[in-house]
């Protein structure tokens, strides 16, 4: 007799648990909800506040709230460029205040030269204010890239430097009347912060233009792709030939310019320049970016999401004021929103990673 080897019977592959497709479907639904969380929160806020106050959804209040949103949205758009590279900019509120004082000083008392005092047109004053913001942003970028200062420390230091410079500009005083005079050719500053076009505030139109330009830059240009590459993996970006330092300096310049523009809009609306203009606005800007889905680690985010986040922050703040909530509780609620935004962003990333593993 010969030995015969009988192959062991083949067992069929274990069938996936019957609940797995259902669990995957639930996970996908949860991921979709997390991705659209900003819109969901905005709708919930509108429903809650409109049920509490009949004034909340009136045309005049909606226009006013959207005008307030515009200033924070422009700040947040600039901050988003920085966060996409993995950085942070805590100085935007102070840059807005500095640009406000520079513009206010030029309009109120002009610029002294040996031959006399020169007064600039409003368009030139606005341009100078934006350039000041861009230059401060460039300093941030150089500190971070050339001197290897951590973004948090560099921009925190600039927060104090820019605010101190704003206070020194007028010895802590205020430039109270920025209407200008016809003889000096510097009238019309109120246009950008007070006037409307087709019933919509000029500030909102400016926000739309800035947001549209930012969307095009981040989604349609090589520069935008490099921003995401730097934030996604800086080492890989360097190896692929991207000039990382130039990209970083550029995004801080953009952030500074956006901050200055927001400060000018706020100053125009108030009709006066204060050294403390836009104090703590950097927190609202960062909160709007994070709530809109921009990852603090960099490499992920959208401008549209940031604008939606700004709407949530703005509609929440104005709603709390309208229903009579104290300023102390407003701070508590805003802080809770920031924490909520970070938690949900992390939950989205974990869920997305788990789904990718399941489908691999």
Image (cartoon, rainbow, N blue to C red):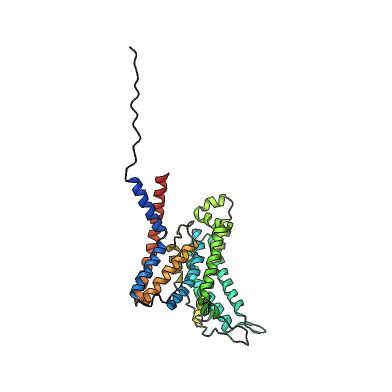
Q: Residue furthest right?
A: 115
Rendered location of residue 191, percent (x, y): 55, 79
* Residue at x-position 58% and y-position 76%: 126
Rendered location of residue 99, percent (x, y): 54, 75
| Location of the N terminus (image quadrant) | top left
* Residue at x-position 41% and y-position 50%: 353
Rendered location of residue 60, percent (x, y): 44, 78
User: Which quadrant of the view contains residue 127?
Assistant: bottom right
Classify 329 as above or below 232: below
Can residue 330 be seen from the camera position used here? yes
> Would residue 259 appear left or right of 348 to someone viewing this image?
right
> Would residue 289 appear left or right of 127 to someone viewing this image?
left
Classify 360 as above or below 348: above
Please give the count of numbered marks on the rendered protein.
0
Rendered location of residue 157, percent (x, y): 49, 68
| Location of the C terminus (image quadrant) | top left
Q: Residue furthest top?
A: 1
Pick the residue in front: 196 or 34.
Answer: 196
Pick the residue in front: 45 or 280.
Answer: 45
Can residue 165 be seen from the camera position used here? no
> Would residue 19 appear left or right of 199 to someone viewing this image?
left
């Amino acid at each position: 007799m010969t030995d015969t080897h009988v192959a062991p019977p083949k067992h069929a592959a274990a069938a996936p648990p019957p609940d797995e497709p259902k669990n995957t479907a639930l996970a996908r639904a949860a991921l979709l909800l997390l991705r659209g969380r900003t819109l969901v929160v905005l709708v919930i806020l509108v429903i809650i506040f409109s049920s509490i106050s009949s004034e909340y959804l009136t045309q005049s209040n909606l226009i006013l709230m959207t005008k307030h949103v515009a200033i924070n949205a422009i700040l947040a758009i600039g901050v988003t460029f920085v966060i996409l590279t993995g950085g942070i900019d805590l100085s935007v509120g102070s840059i807005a205040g500095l640009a406000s004082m520079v513009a206010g000083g030029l309009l109120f008392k002009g610029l002294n030269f040996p031959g006399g005092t020169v007064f600039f047109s409003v368009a030139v004053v606005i341009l100078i204010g934006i350039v000041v913001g861009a230059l401060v942003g460039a300093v941030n970028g150089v500190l971070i890239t050339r001197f290897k200062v951590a973004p948090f420390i560099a921009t925190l230091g600039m927060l104090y430097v820019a605010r101190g410079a704003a206070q020194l500009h007028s010895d802590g005083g205020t430039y109270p009347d920025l209407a200008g005079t016809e003889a000096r050719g510097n009238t019309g500053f109120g246009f950008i912060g007070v006037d409307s076009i087709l019933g919509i505030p000029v500030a909102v139109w400016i926000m739309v233009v800035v947001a549209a330009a930012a969307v095009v830059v981040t989604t349609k240009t090589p520069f935008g792709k490099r921003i995401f590459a730097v934030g996604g993996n800086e080492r890989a970006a360097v190896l692929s030939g991207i000039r990382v330092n130039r990209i970083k300096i550029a995004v801080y310049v953009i952030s500074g310019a956006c901050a200055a523009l927001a400060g000018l809009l706020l100053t125009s609306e108030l009709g006066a320049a204060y050294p403390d203009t836009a104090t703590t606005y950097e927190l609202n800007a960062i909160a709007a970016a994070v709530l809109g889905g921009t990852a603090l680690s960099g490499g992920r985010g959208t401008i549209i999401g940031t604008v939606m986040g700004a709407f949530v922050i703005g509609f929440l703040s104005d709603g709390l004021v309208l229903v009579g909530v104290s300023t102390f509780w407003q701070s508590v609620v805003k802080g809770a929103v920031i924490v909520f935004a970070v938690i949900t962003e992390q939950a989205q990333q974990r869920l997305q990673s788990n789904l990718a593993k399941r489908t691999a």
